[in-house]
Image (spheres, helix red, strand yellow):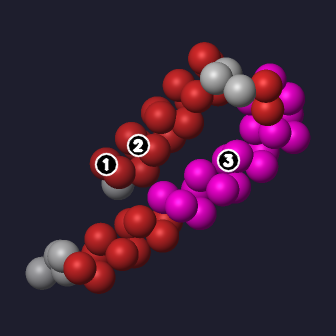
Amino acid sequence: MLAGGIAVAAFLVLIIFAPIQAFNRPLGILIFLVIFAAGAEILRRRTLREFPAD
Protein backbone atom coordinates (compact mmCIF):
# COMPACT_ATOMS: atom_id res chain seq x y z
CA MET A 1 0.00 0.00 0.00
CA LEU A 2 2.84 2.39 0.85
CA ALA A 3 4.62 1.57 -2.40
CA GLY A 4 1.48 2.37 -4.37
CA GLY A 5 1.21 5.76 -2.69
CA ILE A 6 4.84 6.52 -3.41
CA ALA A 7 4.38 5.51 -7.05
CA VAL A 8 1.34 7.78 -7.40
CA ALA A 9 3.22 10.67 -5.80
CA ALA A 10 6.19 10.16 -8.12
CA PHE A 11 3.93 10.11 -11.17
CA LEU A 12 2.18 13.30 -10.05
CA VAL A 13 5.56 15.00 -9.68
CA LEU A 14 6.39 13.95 -13.24
CA ILE A 15 3.11 15.42 -14.50
CA ILE A 16 3.60 18.68 -12.60
CA PHE A 17 7.18 19.31 -13.73
CA ALA A 18 6.71 17.78 -17.23
CA PRO A 19 10.37 16.95 -17.92
CA ILE A 20 9.48 15.87 -21.48
CA GLN A 21 6.93 17.17 -23.96
CA ALA A 22 4.77 14.04 -23.72
CA PHE A 23 3.64 15.03 -20.21
CA ASN A 24 1.94 18.10 -21.66
CA ARG A 25 -0.44 16.01 -23.77
CA PRO A 26 -3.29 13.83 -22.45
CA LEU A 27 -2.37 10.87 -24.67
CA GLY A 28 1.26 11.06 -23.57
CA ILE A 29 0.20 11.11 -19.92
CA LEU A 30 -2.05 8.09 -20.47
CA ILE A 31 0.68 6.10 -22.22
CA PHE A 32 3.21 6.86 -19.50
CA LEU A 33 0.62 6.05 -16.83
CA VAL A 34 0.08 2.57 -18.27
CA ILE A 35 3.82 1.92 -18.58
CA PHE A 36 4.51 3.30 -15.09
CA ALA A 37 1.70 1.26 -13.49
CA ALA A 38 2.84 -1.92 -15.21
CA GLY A 39 6.42 -1.36 -14.05
CA ALA A 40 5.34 -0.66 -10.47
CA GLU A 41 3.22 -3.83 -10.41
CA ILE A 42 6.04 -5.95 -11.81
CA LEU A 43 8.43 -4.56 -9.19
CA ARG A 44 5.87 -5.20 -6.43
CA ARG A 45 5.38 -8.83 -7.50
CA ARG A 46 9.11 -9.50 -7.75
CA THR A 47 9.70 -7.99 -4.32
CA LEU A 48 6.94 -10.09 -2.76
CA ARG A 49 8.33 -13.22 -4.38
CA GLU A 50 11.84 -12.47 -3.08
CA PHE A 51 10.73 -11.28 0.37
CA PRO A 52 7.45 -13.04 1.23
CA ALA A 53 5.31 -11.39 3.92
CA ASP A 54 4.89 -14.17 6.46
The amino acid marked with disc number 3 is Leu
Identify the mark nearer the N-term, 2 or 3: 2
Element marked by disc 1: helix
Q: Residue 7 versus residue 54: which sits nearer the camera?
A: 7
Residue range in magenta is 23-40
Q: Tell me residue 26's x, y (percent).
A: 85, 34
Which residue occupies 55% across, 36% down?
11
Real-space Cα distance between discs 1 and 2? 5 Å
Q: Could you say which disc has been placed on residue 5 in the image?
A: 2
Classify residue 29 as left or right of residue 9.
right
Per the image, the residue denoted by label 3 is: 33
Query: Looking at the rendering, which quadrant does residue 22 occupy?
Result: top right
Per the image, the residue denoted by label 1 is: 2
| Mark 1–mark 2 CB contact (< 8 Å) | yes
Identify the mark nearer the N-term, 3 or 1: 1
Real-space Cα distance between discs 2 and 3? 14 Å
Q: Residue 42 versus residue 53: which sits nearer the camera?
A: 42
